Amino acid sequence: MSRMEQMASATDKIGVFDSELDDLSAMLFADARPLTFDVAGRIIIPTDLLKHAGISERAIFVGRGNSFQIWAPDAFKAAQEKSLNNLRTSRPNLKIIV
């Protein structure tokens, strides 16, 4: 089962008449689209998504368990620092080595 199918199945379990599900479904699925690949098998990221992510010349791939995200390097560094600060605040006993 694909990741999108798993998410669709999970949202189906929330409840068809749940108003919060409408918002969640819109965020997860409204702009979803299949990716295309070049002849070498590389993903071709649509221009609007590159622009949205602020990606121009370089990008980094960041593992997220069963999936990954593609970031502009500077944006990822800032987000990573924010996440680290959030963890230090919300879980002060967690040992974080950077």
Image (cartoon, rainbow, N blue to C red):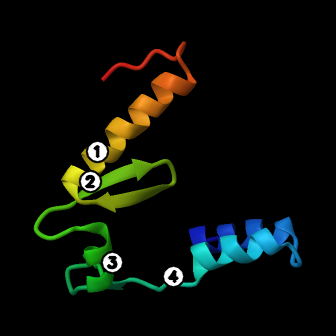
Q: Which residue is mark 1?
A: 78
**x then y, percent, for residue 7:** 66, 68
Instruction: Kindly indicate whether the residue at mark 2 contacts the one at mark 3 (C-beta within 8 angstroms).
Output: no
Query: Mark 3 vs mark 2: which is more N-terminal?
Result: 3
Q: What amino acid is found at the position of numbered circle 1 in the picture?
A: Ala
Quarter the N terminus occupies? bottom right
- Residue depth check, mark 4 versus mark 2: number of the one nearer the observer: 2
Number of residues whose C-alpha sits closer than 10 Å to that of mark 4, classed few (under 14), some (14–19) or many (20 or more):
few
Picture disc at residue 32: 4
Q: Residue most toward the left?
A: 57
Instruction: Kindly indicate whether the residue at mark 1 contacts the one at mark 2 (C-beta within 8 angstroms).
Output: yes
Q: What amino acid is found at the position of numbered circle 2 in the picture?
A: Ala
Picture disc at residue 92: none
Residue in the picture at 41% in, 57% down: 68
Residue at disc 1, secondary structure: helix
Cα distance between the residues tagged 2 and 1: 5 Å
**x then y, percent, for residue 36:** 34, 86
Cα distance between the residues tagged 3 and 1: 19 Å
Cα distance between the residues tagged 4 and 3: 11 Å
Q: Which residue is mark 2?
A: 75
Picture disc at residue 49: 3
